[in-house]
């Protein structure tokens, strides 16, 4: 998993460095990468393909997934008062906002960095119950975004 720079993009590194390949019939094998080194990637999951090509032009591919995930773990401003209750939860969880902080949304990510769901939190008041019945049993990271910052919480779904 990789995290984007402050501008929101992760610049794809060179995954061919240190990779070696050989061929019984060729003197030389070249390694290439797609997408190319230096490609800016936003948050998401990308297929990265390394191709070994012998001197006769015969390619062999090896692919893997690269996840670019938002930076998690920073709590800012007065959002520390936000809490989930009945956590672990199975079908619903309640977000308590005792200071009635103006919130925008929550985004729920699995631990591989994949966005699972987004919930609009405008005009929520001091509490909002969130339906999580479609989520699998797992641990999730929840980013709560308000007008003055954001907070990251852990949510455990146990069915």
Image (cartoon, rainbow, N blue to C red):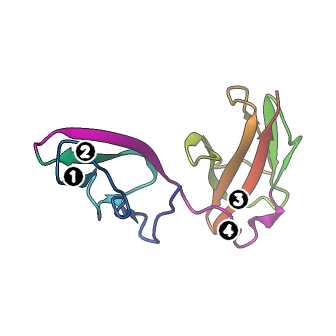
Q: Position of residue 52 (x, y in %)?
A: 26, 47
Residue in the foreground of this view, choosing between 73 and 102 = 73
Q: CA distance from mark 1 to mark 4?
A: 45 Å
Q: Which numbered dot is residue 80?
A: none
Q: Which numbered dot is residue 23?
A: 2
Q: Which residues are magenta?
A: 56-82
Q: Which residue is mark 1?
A: 29
Q: CA distance from mark 2 to mark 4?
A: 48 Å
Q: Indicate which disc, 2 or 1, sits on the residue closer to the N terminus.
A: 2
- Point out the frontmost of discs 2 and 4: 2
Say if mark 1 contacts mark 4, CB within 8 Å: no
Q: Residue at x 79, y 28 (%)?
A: 91
Q: Quadrant of the C terminus?
A: top right
- Point out the frontmost of discs 2 and 1: 2
Q: Indicate which disc, 2 or 4, sits on the residue closer to the N terminus.
A: 2
Say if mark 1 contacts mark 3, CB within 8 Å: no
Q: Which residue is mark 4?
A: 74
Q: Residue at x 71, y 73 (%)?
A: 77
Residue in the foreground of this view, choosing between 59 and 74 = 59
Callout 4 crowding tier (Cα within 10 Å): few <14, some 14–19, many ≥20: few
- Point out the frontmost of discs 2 and 3: 2
Q: Indicate which disc, 1 or 3, sits on the residue closer to the N terminus.
A: 1
Say if mark 4 contacts mark 3, CB within 8 Å: yes
Q: Indicate which disc, 2 or 3, sits on the residue closer to the N terminus.
A: 2
Residue in the foreground of this view, choosing between 39 and 141 = 39
- Point out the frontmost of discs 1 and 3: 1
């Amino acid at each position: 998993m990789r995290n984007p720079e402050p501008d929101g993009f992760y610049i794809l590194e060179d995954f061919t460095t240190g990779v070696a390949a050989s061929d019984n019939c060729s003197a030389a094998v070249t390694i290439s990468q797609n997408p190319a080194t230096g490609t800016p990637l936003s948050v998401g999951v990308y297929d990265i393909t390394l191709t070994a090509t012998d001197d006769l032009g015969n390619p062999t591919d090896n692919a893997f997934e690269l996840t670019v995930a938002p930076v998690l773990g920073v709590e800012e401003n007065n959002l520390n008062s936000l809490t989930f209750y009945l956590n672990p939860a199975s079908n619903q969880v309640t977000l308590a906002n005792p200071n009635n902080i103006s919130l925008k949304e929550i985004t729920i990510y699995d631990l591989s960095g994949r966005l699972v769901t987004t919930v609009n939190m405008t005009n929520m008041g001091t509490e909002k119950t969130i339906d999580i019945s479609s989520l699998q049993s797992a641990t999730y990271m929840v980013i709560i975004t308000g007008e003055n910052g954001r907070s990251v919480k852990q949510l455990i779904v146990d069915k």
